[in-house]
Amino acid sequence: MKTLVFFGSARKKGHTKDLLNMVLKDLNGEVEIVDAYRTEISPCIDCRYCWENRGCSINDYMQKVYPKIDEADNIIFASPLYFNNVPGPLKSIIDRCQVYWASRKRKQEKNIKDKNALLLICGGAPSYNNQFLAIELVLKGILKDLNAELVGNIYVPNTDKVSVLENKNVLKKASELGLKLKNLYND
Ligand SMILES: Cc1cc2nc3c(=O)[nH]c(=O)nc-3n(C[C@H](O)[C@H](O)[C@H](O)COP(=O)(O)O)c2cc1C
């Protein structure tokens, strides 16, 4: 089982990383983390190369990420909320997945296998209306293009006051989701 994580936090060891580690603890198989802030991936420039061709015209680390996406059984997005959305570097990676949208549009679906997906999101503010609505919309959009089915999520508000590690509900849910992914793979 191969799990590919897109990690969106500017802080290497913040709440998002704690949350991710809790889920990964109960997963087995290979885990690879694409750390958006510490990986050079340029934004999409809408050159439309992918409208006519396979792949992306920009030659950077994303070229190494595409095969990892193709091979992954699980995709995990682990991200903080920045102005209700993903931080910029993670958005760049998402936008570079336009190649998958384009291949669908051309009806030359890349041979991208079915995947399961999790969304792990931390927001610093106390719970407010629609806190996780925009980020969920963005991430569900990309999961569709990656042929990944969302099988679970953990959205944690109030991390500025209560750390993820102190949050007992989160601990339980994280462990359940890790096991769920593992069991879905075995089915
Ligand atoms: C630029 C920026 C924008 C943020 N916007 C939001 C927001 O819209 N809603 C929210 O609940 N928290 C917001 N936060 C707080 C972060 O989501 C929170 O501190 C989170 O735990 C950061 O993740 P980390 O602990 O992995 O670094 C923002 C933080 C930053 C730096």
Image (spheres, rainbow, N blue to C red):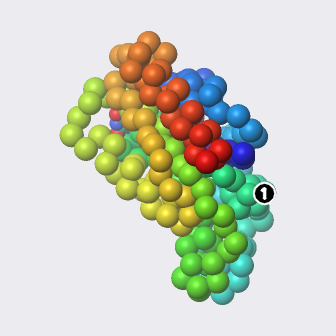
Give the percent coordinates (x, y) of residue 143. 51, 58
Q: Residue at x 62, y 39 (%)?
A: 182
Location of residue 77 with respect to 109 vertically, above or below: above
**The disc labelled 1 sits on which kind of residue?**
Lys
Left or right: where does residue 29 sit relative to residue 155? right
Give the quadrant of residue 156: top left
Query: Outermost residue, front direction?
Result: 187
Q: Residue at x 49, y 16 (%)?
A: 165
Label 1 Cα crowd, 10 Å radius (few <14 / some 14-19 / many 20+):
few
Q: Residue at x 56, y 64 (%)?
A: 147
Give the quadrant of residue 31: top right
Q: Residue at x 38, y 56 (%)?
A: 137
Which of these two is toward me, 147 or 37?
147
Location of residue 19 with respect to 61 vertically, above or below: above
The residue carrying mark 1 is 64
Query: Outermost residue, left direction?
Result: 129
**The N terminus appears in which quarter of the rendering?**
top right
Which of these two is toward me, 105 or 63?
105
Report the image quarter containing ligand 1.
Answer: top left
Give the percent coordinates (x, y) of residue 28. 70, 34
Residue 107 shows in this picture: yes
Query: Outermost residue, top direction?
Result: 166
- Secondary structure under the numbered disc 1 in the rendered image: helix
Give the percent coordinates (x, y) of residue 93. 60, 55
Give the percent coordinates (x, y) of residue 184. 58, 45
- How many labels, in total? 1
Ligand 1 under 8 Å from disc 1 Cβ: no
Residue 90 shows in this picture: no
